Image (cartoon, helix red, strand yellow):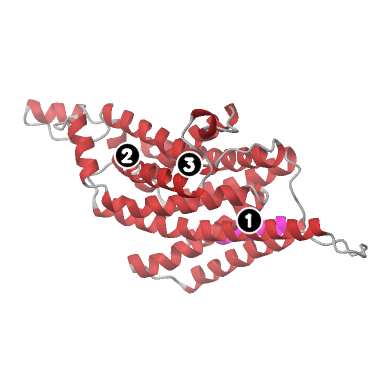
Amino acid sequence: MEKPESEEELQSLTSATAVDRLDEPNSFTTTLFSFVIFILIVLQATATALIVSYSRGVLKQEWDTLTLLLMTEVAKMIISVIGIVLGYSGDGTMSTLDILSRNIKTTLPMSVPGILYLIQNYLGMYALGSIDATTFTLISQNKLISTAIFSRFVLDKKFSSSRIRSLMLVAVGAFQVSYSTMPQKDPCSQEEDKNEQVLFRIWLLGVTAAFISSSCSGFSTVYMEKMFKGVPNLTVWDRNFQLSFCSIPLYLLAILLFSKTTFSFNSFFHGWSLLIVILTIIGAFGGILIALCLKYADSILKTFAATGAILLTAFLTYWWLSGPMNCYIAIAAVVVITSVINYQLEA
């Protein structure tokens, strides 16, 4: 091993952070970090789905979705600034204010995923309030299809016949679980129940929202991949700061245009509880985790994290919230999980 030729070079080597060392291939740090990210993403996705379903479906809490998403972005920006202040951004020669100034000046491209995340998160929250968490999680796996389509045109990726079959099976599995959870009319009833029509409309809107949300997720993932590869000198903290910097004004505008919420304290936080505060913090860390996964891990890790969230969400929804669990959902879950894994493992 060559010795550093100067004191400055030695200092540069010894001051490398743990995050810097994650780029070293086949290191124990990388393996351990990937395992931790896998566990945290599974827990974060599962916790978000369950808390929203419990809050909306069981507690009947009436908090404003846009307000929640806005506060989530504020929390994520604070976390990102803390990461920058602690020295996990820049080359060591830039001050924190210089880094933040640079990030703000180069933040315009991040407005695209900012808008997409606004649509995706809003529709996702609406869907979770209309359908059960298991159905939402399985339908959300259609983001693999949208990601593949956008990757083909945006990143010019090629797909084998095996991967195309996997994509088709994912669609079949998601449609199967959607149909199996659709409210059914009682065949013994002679009169049409208006409540059943209302339940069907709620279910249909929830499923539609989940499909659109997953499509937005697919494009935003492809776009973010291109951004990460295009400007490698910007860290996870820089990108999350930029994303929040773009998203916060969009959420404020959306609240002004589409929400009944005013900016008084009682109106802004109407319906909030400790549970919603926890949900906000979980959502903020979820954005950081996804960014870390995109930068330091790989697609196989993301796949197993997503499938792990499906299994855990399905089990906990059935056990805790009395959610649906039948042979059709079980078969659909197996089809989706097998197809996603096969897609990622296929070279």
Compute the Cα span from label 2 to label 1: 31 Å
Residue type of the residue flagged with mark 1: Gly
Q: Which residues are magenta?
A: 328-339
Q: Earlier in the sequence, mark 2 or mark 1?
A: 1
Mark 3 falls on what kind of element?
helix
User: Disc number at residue 241?
Assistant: 2
Residue type of the residue flagged with mark 2: Phe
Mark 1 neighbour density, 10 Å: few (under 14) some (14–19) many (20 or more): many
Q: Residue 320 in magenta?
A: no
Q: Which residue is mark 1?
A: 206
Asked if one can make out residue 69 in the rendered structure from this viewpoint, the answer is yes
Tell me the mark number nearer the camera, choosing from 2 and 1. 1
Q: Pointer 3 and pointer 2: residues touching (CB < 8 Å)?
A: no
Q: Which residue is mark 3?
A: 69
Task: Name the image quarter holding residue 42.
Answer: top right
Placement of the N terminus among the 4 image quadrants: top left
